[in-house]
Image (spheres, rainbow, N blue to C red):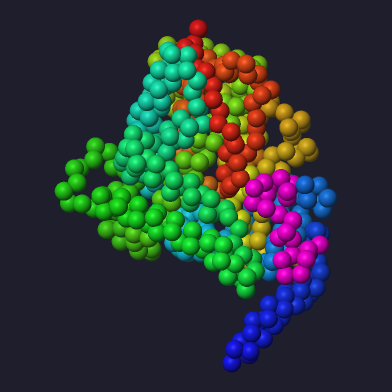
Amino acid sequence: MVSTLLIVCLVLPVFMFFFQYLKTLKNRHRPPGPRGFPIIGNLHQLNNSDLYLQLWKLSKKYGPLFSLQLGLRQAIVVSSPELAKVVMKDHDLVFCGRPKLLGQQKLSYDGVDIAFSPYNSYWREIRKICVVHLLSSMRVSSFSSVRHFEVKQLIKKISMHASSSKATNLSEALMCLTSSIICRIAFGRRYEDEGTEKSRFHELFNECQAMMGIFFFSDFVPFLGWIDKLTGLHARLERNFKELDTFYQEVIDEHMDPNRKPPENEDLIDVLLQLKKQRSFSVDLENDHIKAVFMNMLVAATDTTAATTIWAMTLLLKHPRVMKKVQEEIRNLGGKKDFLDEDDTQKFPYFKAVIKETLRLHLPAPLLVPRETNEPCTIGDYEIPAKTLVYVNAWAIHRDSKAWKDPEEFLPERFLNNTTDFRGQDFEFIPFGAGRRICPGMTMAIASLDLILANLLRLFDWELPKGMKKEDIDTEVLPGIAQHKKNPLCVLAKFRS
């Protein structure tokens, strides 16, 4: 019996490899791509730390559409605006699926969220619920007082540092700010001044982000999934899921407590719990659905807004000409108000151009969330099978020399008198994606980004610490789904002269 089992264990992987190899031979009209090794394919050529850069380099050799063999999964990589339009507009219905990847599926309660759910009737309904009831322009506007309060708290902290000529760690300050905004909007409380609670909150979500982007053997070579258990990755994922689930449940229990003091303003958990009671949708909302949706919001919204603001300040400090020009615009057109609101920021065209140029060079997620084909499709002369993984390399598209003049340069002027926008219609500029899978939280993210950056630029002059030059500011990136600056941005704030 033991010997038979051993033979099966040895023979089965070989059989599966040759089965996959025969499938590959059958599909000879795949886009070109690098040759891989048996069983693992091209996995040995890639790592998660800077995957978008590796794929960009491969696109230089194999073209803007090329193939990869990732273990037993076939994949294609899209690296040009023209092909992005084909994938996210012309054939959007075919390319709007989501692959089932272990970390993402586990943390999204088996894909009942918005970001990682497969394309089906459930996803359409949950997205509609979120867009109409949680992320609409009216709902975003209703939380303006929360954003204003939290930004003013940040300004107070920076003012204290300015008074004592102390450097401010902007990276840390902005992460705390954006998480406070999202936490108050989502479930009516902030964690920034609560000691161990603050530490617990940030550790949980930092680990969550890591587990979503990590490589699991079981995703690409299922019969090697035992390696994930051997290395402890599986246990690490399970532990993070259980800790997050406990956190979400505590928040829901607080909101359902009959003795809870009625809030002045309802938060998004209140909204979803009311919708759950109404049972007026084709989807019967349960606690797991609520938890999964809030995982998306807490992870995505905190990450993207903070990262983009930090990159904007980094780029402005490295380009004093642009810093001076945008500050003059804000200060000249902003009137005599002590604090700029969201409506004020719409009056600053150059400021808006700075934000767009920042999103072009340092978009929140360089590789858009992976897609999967729902059925076979043809692109040009190439056949793309069903269940093919699809990576849209937005980082490469934003640096396409055919679409952008001097693509590596920070030139906000390129967006002046230019209708190119990030709302999914201009495929050379897709920081939030496009098509059915465009980020539904875009309006909320931009509202916070505008408010934070405009007030920081208006109220303070910014200098580098003594002995540091603009050339010393690094632009290294941390590994992960989001593009975070590797080293903290520490600067001196001075009251405007």
Compared to residue 63, the image places residue 182 above or below, namely: above
Residue 233, image x, y percentages: 53, 60
Image-based side of 414 in relation to 164, left or right: right
Task: Tell me if residue 253 comes above or below residue 398 in the rendering.
Answer: below
Q: Residue at x 69, y 66 (%)?
A: 71
Q: Is residue 154 magenta?
A: no
Residue 184 visible in image: no
Q: Dividing the image into 4 quarters, which one contains the N terminus?
A: bottom right
For image coordinates 78% across by 63% down, the residue present is: 36
Q: Is residue 16 above or below residue 97?
A: below
Residue 493 visible? The answer is: yes
Q: Position of residue 24 (x, y in %)?
A: 77, 71
Say which residue appears at 38% left-offset and 48% top-offset: 133
Of all residues, the one furthest to the front in this rendering is: 2
Q: Which residues are magenta?
A: 35-56
* Count of marks overlaid on the render: 0
Nearer the observer, 396 or 35: 35
Residue 497 location, x and y as percent?
50, 7
Instruction: Name the residue furthest bottom.
Output: 1
Picture quadrant of residue 361: top right
Which residue is situated farthest in the top direction here?
497
Q: Position of residue 46 (x, y in %)?
A: 71, 54
Quadrant position of residue 212:
bottom right
Q: Residue furthest left?
A: 259
